[in-house]
Each structure stands twice: as structure tokens, then as C-alpha cells.
Image: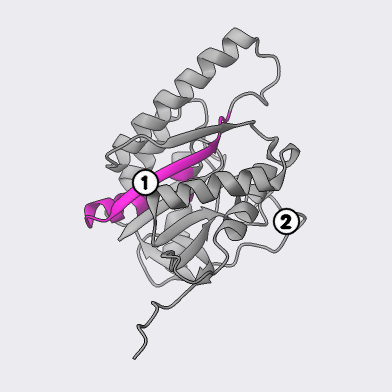
Amino acid sequence: MKVLCIAAHPDDEVLGCGATLARLVRERHEVAVAILGEGVTSRSGLTSEQQRRALAELRDAAGAASRALGLDAAPRMLGLPDNRFDTLPLLEVVHAVEALVREYDPELVYTHHAGDLNVDHRVTAQAVSTALRPQHGRRVREVRAFEIASSTEWAFETSGPAFRPQIFVEVEHTLAHKLAAMACYEGEAREYPHPRSARALRALAEWRGAQGGLHTAEAYELVQRREAEREAA
């Protein structure tokens, strides 16, 4: 199976579905990650040279995180402006997603929840839904929305419906890969009790596991599912 994760920022791919991606790699599925935004330039007080260095460090961190998850390649990074996706024509973002889908031809897509607090997450979710609207001949069979600790739960339904997962993926044997990948993002990880701390991420995995009758899990909201097309008799 070919799987594509479409994330807004470097570290979202790890926070949202890192342990699931690591499990899919272990099960010998073909997994790719695309990150739409550059993840730095919205930070205040940085000179252009500091921004350049921060971008390079973030790219290096993304590559290291991918290796920690077992992926063969670093994420494809498109460099859209950080926390300013809403300043772009939606069609521009949709076309970027459509190009990724043509290139990777996935069957399963993971992306953001449409009700997140972060505007880039919401635009990504809308662009993916638009680009992957059901059409004859398209190979994508399922789209799943993930949660991002410190964004999804902090929206308090002010940005859209709350995250209500129906899919729970057992990640007992790959959660350590997720935590190791997140540690690669030294500038994004936080100390407990922040939701992006290793302790909080483990607790979330245990809670989602308990919800799904599992030990540890990552949770997803089903956005779209299509049955395989049947050949005409």
C-alpha cells in the first residue's frame, strides 16, 4: 500500500501520525511525507540570517525525524509561508496538494483535522479535502485526519467541530520511534506538562489506546473512504 502524510509544518508529521508511519514502514508499506510550510518565518525577532539558519536546522531535523521513523527519504518540503497559509489563494495550496498526489499516487492519506486552532492546519485540511474530492479513477481510498497536541485540543471548537476519532491504530511497538523522532525537533519539543512533551505524548497514546481497547494508539477521524471500484461485468 502507498501512504502519504501531508502536514503543514515540520514536526506535525511526527505529532500527528509518527508512530503509525513507523508501523507502516515496519509492515513494508511505501510511506512518504510532504510538509507544506517552512515552519520558521512567523517567529518574531529573527533577522534574515537567523531565519536562514533556523530553516536549515529545521530541514535537518525533519530528515533526522524521518530516519527515526524508518522512512527511506526525508520529507518533501514545499516552503509555504509559516502561519500565513490563509494569505495564499486556496487554489494555490490545492494545486500543490494535487501535484503531490499525482507524484506519489497514494491509496491512504493522513492529514490535519479541519477544526485545529492553527490556521495552517485548517487550510491544509481544506486543501486536501478539495484536492481529493471523490473522482472516478482516483486511487486514494481513504483520508484520515490526525490530531496535533497543543493545537487540536486547544481550539475548543472555536475553529470548527471538535476532533472525534473513530479509528485507533495500535502503536505499542512503534511509540518509541515517535518519541525519538520528536526529540529530533529540539526547538519544537517542550517540557512536561506541555502537550508536546514526551511524557504528555505517551499519556495521549495510552489514553487513545484505552478508548480503542488497545494498549497504546494514535487516533484518527475518518474524512473520506471509498470502496474499491469494481470492473464492469
Residue 139 placement, left or right of 28: right
The secondary structure type at the circle numbered 1 is strand
Q: Position of residue 24 (x, y in %)?
A: 30, 55
Residue 42 placement, left or right of 96: right
Q: What residue type is labelled 1?
A: Ala
Nearer to us of marks 2 and 1 is: 1
Spot the residue most to the front.
233
Q: Observer-nearest residue: 160 or 218? A: 160
User: Badge 1 is on which residue?
Assistant: 32
Q: Where is residue 88 in the image (x, y as percent from the top left)?
A: 71, 39
Q: Where is residue 79 in the image (x, y as percent from the top left)?
A: 55, 30
User: Badge 2 is on which residue?
Assistant: 156
Inspect this view and state whether residue 17 appears: no
Residue 41 placement, left or right of 58: right
Magenta-span inclusion, residue 28:
yes
At x 51% / y 25%, what residue is drawn?
187
Callout 1: 10 Å neighbours few (<14), some, many (20+)?
A: many
Magenta-span inclusion, residue 123:
no
Q: Observer-nearest residue: 150 or 41? A: 41
Inspect this view and state whether residue 179 appears: yes
